[in-house]
Image: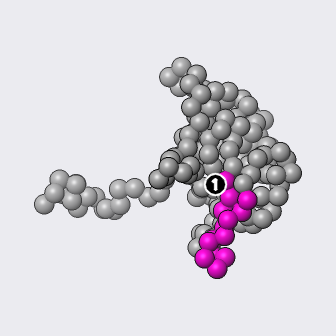
Amino acid sequence: MHKLEEGVSRLKNPILFTRVGYSYLPTTSIEESINWYTKYLGLKLVDKFEDRGSFIGVLHYPHKNAIAVVLVETENHKPLTIIRNGIKFPIMAMACPDIEYTHNILKENGVEVENINVLGNGEAKYFYFRDNEGNFLEAAWSIWDLEDEIKEDFFKSDDAI
């Protein structure tokens, strides 16, 4: 028996991982990025602290089981983009319940967005954009998206942070 199998078999629950926990994004200005993600994407700052010589900002989406976006302040300006077969590809996709609405709102607010792309017979749609630091992101919608409950206190103001 493999070591991992031995260890897992001793556990009551053999699941090692349940989901992606965080998505780390670099920023050279934590305050500007926190403002950008809260203003343009509607995320909520839940914590900000210093760690290993720079600040970390933890932002949440409104859904109960969504992963956190963790902004990591750094002196090194290196926006993230995946290169897939020589073509830029996003580092993270964010689900939108109404992608056309999201596209219009971002565009109206001055965020540079690419055109909406449609896959198949309209089962999935997506568009690309960059955050204030140049990280390459995707907004996505599909008929396969899971539904989740909204956090009860998400829209309450929290000035304590």
The total number of labels drawn is 1
Q: Secondary structure at mark 1?
A: strand
Magenta highlight range: 115-128
Q: Measuring 31% from the left and 62% from the top, which residue is drawn there?
A: 14
Q: Is residue 102 above or below residue 34?
A: below
Quadrant placement of the C terminus:
top right
Q: Is residue 142 above or below residue 110?
A: below
Q: Which color scheme is applied?
A: one colour
Q: Is residue 129 left or right of residue 6?
A: right
Pick the front one: 116 or 70: 116
Pick the front one: 112 or 59: 112
- Position of residue 4 measured from the top left corner of the image (x, y, whole percent): 22, 54
Quadrant placement of the N terminus:
bottom left
Mark 1 residue crowding within 10 angstroms, few (<14) / some (14–19) / many (20+): some
Pick the front one: 81 or 52: 81
**Residue at the front extreme of this rendering:** 86
**Pointer 1: what residue?**
138
**Residue 50 visible in the shown view:** no
**Residue at the right extreme of this rendering:** 108
**Residue 112 visible in the shown view:** yes
Q: Measuring 68% from the left and 44% from the top, which residue is drawn there?
A: 130
The quarter holding residue 15 reads bottom left
What is the three-letter code of the residue carrying label 1?
A: Glu
Pick the front one: 132 or 117: 117
Q: Is residue 106 above or below residue 100?
A: above
Query: Is residue 118 inside the magenta stretch?
Result: yes
- Position of residue 49 measured from the top left corner of the image (x, y, whole percent): 60, 28
